[in-house]
Image (cartoon, helix red, strand yellow):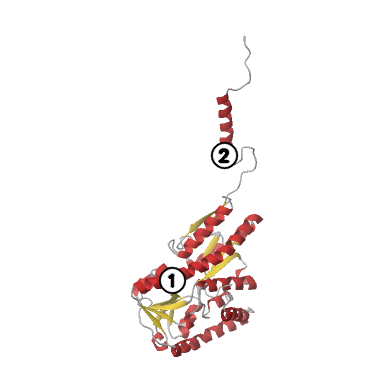
Amino acid sequence: MRKRTATRTPWKRLAAGTLMLAMGWLTGCNPGGGKPSEVIKLSYSIFFPPTHVQYLAAEEWAREIERRSEGRLQIVLYPAGSLTKADQCYEGVVQGISDLGMSCFAYTRGRFPLMEGLDLPLGYPDGATATRIANRMVEKHQPAELADVRVLYLHAHGPGVLASKKPVRSLADMKGLKVRATGLSAKIVEALGGTPVAMSQPETYEALQRGVVEATLCPVETLKGWRQGETIQYVVDAPALGYTTAMFVVMNRDRWSKLPPDLQALFNTVNREWIEKHGAAWDQADRDGRALVTELGREFIALPAEEQARWKTAVQPVLDDYVTQATGKNLPGAELLAEVQAELARGDATR
């Protein structure tokens, strides 16, 4: 009787190899064995709607992080305040409701007393400049008010304007005007004689449409990005309104500390690149917003030089009050304000 050999036929060897490979895939190991690679999933709360240019920039950032991590990181975005509302976003990150968050410091007035200085009416020329300056200031001063999160980067919109349902051609026309404003911009409205009404951008379209407010302080981009150009008739350009709104991108501190060092370094690298991208996106959005308002036939009002001087004098107490308040809290508000003004005066903030 012939003895059986242990030699396998070719197809049996192939089947066995395929089975081993499949088992490796199922267990997360390579065919040679080893520890399964961990996928770190992060949730990202963003107050912008999914069509907004800044949401799209954030989405591109998230995909770039994922790509460079070779799949070790996965970031799930929640737009339009679907995870945490705009004014709850920061605390949501602190408490771990979301791992990452993007919103405005101005939406929680008084919570960020030093960072409020970035939003002052200082005559910012564009979003790229405002964004670069904001990041320089937070990096230099390392505010204690942000110590409960990991700051990834900031970005800030171009110069604010007054978009109104009524014509505003002088300071007298501001008296009693109900204006949507947040944070320090509310003080600007008060200084100009108007009545500030606090609300976030997602609430503004309906408020303008229903007449809850008669105007809004905003960058031109919101007239397209938030569709507010449909509800107003006039856009007032005034140097005294050249404020910005600084916005944060932050991560839960515990989640950050648990990331491997190489992934932390990856975040830092991509963050630096996206500072420029967000600034450029703000400026493109301003151009698009201005084009849309022009197409809609809205009137742009340019204040005469004498009137501009009146507006600038009217808002100076807002700057003075910021310094007083910051000094009373032992914060370097005067220093931060002087540094921002110096950068704007030099005109080298773009380098």
Q: How many marks?
A: 2
What residue do we see at 54% from left, 71% from top?
131
Answer few, some or many: residues within 10 Å of disc 1's Cα (few below 14, many 20 plus, some between 14 and 19): some
Counting residues from the start of the chain, the first of labels 1 and 2 encountered is 2
The label number, if any, that marks residue 244 in the structure image = none
Answer few, some or many: residues within 10 Å of disc 2's Cα (few below 14, many 20 plus, some between 14 and 19): few
What's the residue type where badge 1 is placed? Answer: Arg
**Residue at image mark 2:** 25
| Visible residue check, residue 200 | no
What residue do we see at 49% from left, 74% from top?
158
| Residue sitting at the far bottom | 306
Residue 139, horizontal then vertical, whole percent? 63, 70
What's the residue type where badge 2 is placed? Answer: Trp
What residue do we see at 59% from left, 64% from top?
272
User: Of tags 1 and 2, which is closer to the observer?
Assistant: 1
From the viewer's perspective, is 191 left or right of 261?
A: left
Q: Secondary structure at mark 2?
A: helix
From the viewer's perspective, is 44 left or right of 147?
A: left
Residue 126, horizontal then vertical, whole percent? 50, 74
Residue 195, horizontal then vertical, whole percent? 42, 82
**Residue at image mark 1:** 287
